[in-house]
Image: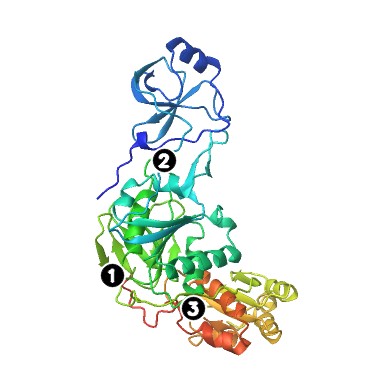
Amino acid sequence: MAIPFSFPSLFFLVINCMPYSGKAKRLLDKSKVKVGDFVNVHWKGEDLTGWLMPRIETGDQDCLVLKMETGYNIGLRDADKIEKIGPRIEIGKIPTMEIKKQSGLPNISLISTGGTIGTHIDYKTGGVFMCRTPEEIIATVPELTKHVSIRSIQSPFTIASEDMNYTHWQKLAKAVAKELNGGAEGVIITHGTDTLHFTAAALSFMLKDLCKPVALVGAQRSPDRAGYDGAMNLLCGAHYATSNIAEVATVMHATTNDDYCHAIRGTKSRKMHTSRRDAFKAINEKPLAAIFPDGRIDKLNEFMKTRVENIVRDETDFEPKVAIVKSYPGSDPSIIDYYVQKKFKGIVIEGLALGHVPTGKSGTKTGSLARKLSWLPHVEKAVKKGVVVVVTTQCIYGRTNAFVYRNLRLLAQAGAIHCSDMLTETAYVKLGWLLGQKLDREDVKKKMLENIAGEINPRITGEFD
C-alpha cells in the first residue's frame, strides 16, 4: 500500500517570509492573486499550475514560488501571466489531531524527540527546522489511529539528532521503561536520522530484560516535501510496536518506494546514505522483519527475542569519556596520547580492514617515517594507563580479526581488543555503557566480546538483505 503525497493535507508554517516585490508584486497586484491561491502561471510558453507560496528572503525578488501538485517547489522568473483557478489554502497553520484512547485497539506510547519527521520549511532561510508537536506529526498519518490506541504522548526534548548525547539516551531509556512497565504494548520514538542508529544501539544496552518492541522512526524528507517518508515509517513503526518481536529496532523505508519498511536490530542498523529514503541497512545480518503499511509482518531473521511478560529495567549509567579514532595512511598516533592526557577511559580505533593500524613493521624497508608513525607504542601506553582500547573496522561488512597478520597480533599484544563484527557506532556506545557500570577493567574487556544485545554475529553467512 503506497501512501500518496497529498499537498492539501500538508501545510506550511511560514515565519519571517518576505512579501513579493518588484515585477512579481506588480504582476500579483494586477492579477489580484495572493499567497495560498491555486493558480495557473503562463511562463515561457508553458502553463504551470500550483499553489503560490511565499518568497524566501534570500530569493530573487522577480521570481514567483509555485508549489506544484507533485509537492515540489519551482521558481518562475519573469512570468507573463498569472490567474487564480482554484480554492485558496491556509498558509501558516499546521494540522493537528486530538489524540483519544480507543477501546479495542492495542495501546502504544509515542515519544517525540525532533528530527526531520517534525519539521517545516522556514521561508526566511529556505531550510527546514524542527517545529511540530507530536500531535502535528501524527496528523501526517491519520490512519495510524485506526490501528493503535495511543495511551501516552510525550516530548522530553526537541533536538536535531546531531546534538544528541548520552544524557538524551538516558532520558529516553527511563521514559521507555516507564511506559512499557506502565501498560504500553510497545513504544514508538520519533527521532532525527543522522544519529538514529546511535540511539537505537544505546537503548538496546540500556533497556535490560526488554520484553516488548521499541521502534525508532524518522524521516529523510520533511512533511512539506514530495516523497515524505515519515508517514509510512510511522505506520509501519506502529505495526512493529504491536508485534511479537521484543527488540529495539529502527523502522524505516526498505526501498525508495512506498512499499514496506525494514525493522533492523538496534545494534546492527546503520545509516548508509545521506538522503535516500532507504538509507538504513542491516549490517552483517538480515533485518528482523519486513513491515507493510497494511499490518503484514514478514519475519526475516530467526534470531530475535519475542514478547514476554516481565519488568523492564533501565540501566543508564554511561561514561562519556570515550572517543572514536580513525586509522588512515599517515595518521598521527599521538591523537591517542591526547585522549589519555584528557583522562579518557576508552578509545575505539576504527581500523583498516581486519582492524589494521600503522605499525611500521609491515616490510623490510618501511622507512623511518613509517616507524615513527607506528600506533603500537601509543596503544600500549594507553592500555598501561588504564584506558580500554578496542578495534573495529572501517569496512561496512565483515569482522575484525587479531590473528591473521603479524601486525594484527602485535596490536593485540599491545592490549587492543578486536571487536569481531561490531559496528563502530555500537562499539562506542557499548564501551561507554560498560565503563559506566563501574566494572573492573578486565571485566569490561571481557564483556566487550560478549554478545549482549545482538551486536556480535557469531557467524556471517554473506546473505545480507
**Residue 262 % position (x, y):** 34, 62
Q: State the residue position of label 2.
A: 225
Name the colour scheme. rainbow
Q: Distance between the Cα atoms at labels 1 and 3? A: 28 Å
**Residue 175 % position (x, y):** 51, 65
* Amino acid type assigned to the residue bearing label 3 in the image: Leu
CB of mark 3 within 8 Å of CB of mark 2?
Answer: no
Front in this rendered view, residue 337 or 92 = 92
Mark 3 vs mark 2, foreground winner is 2
Quadrant (top left, top right, bottom left, bottom right) of the C terminus? bottom left
* Amino acid type assigned to the residue bearing label 2 in the image: Arg
* Amino acid type assigned to the residue bearing label 1 in the image: Leu
**Residue 18 % position (x, y):** 56, 26
Q: Distance between the Cα atoms at labels 2 and 1? A: 32 Å
**Residue 291 % position (x, y):** 29, 61
Examine the rendered structure and indicate whether residue 94 appears above or below residue 147.
above
* Quarter-of-image position of residue 333: bottom right
Instruction: Kindly identify which numbered label has been placed on residue 56.
Output: none
Mark 1 vs mark 3, foreground winner is 1
Front in this rendered view, residue 97 or 45 = 97
Q: State the residue position of label 3.
A: 354
Front in this rendered view, residue 143 or 270 = 143
Instruction: Say what secondary structure mark 2 lies in.
Output: loop
Name the residue: 38% across, 56% down: 150
Q: Is residue 104 left or right of residue 191?
A: left
The tag earlier along the polypeptide, 3 or 2, is 2
Instruction: Kindly identify which numbered label has been placed on residue 300.
Output: 1
Circle 1: is it few (<14), some (14-19), or many (20+) Cα within 10 Å?
some
Front in this rendered view, residue 334 or 174 = 174
CB of mark 2 within 8 Å of CB of mark 1?
Answer: no
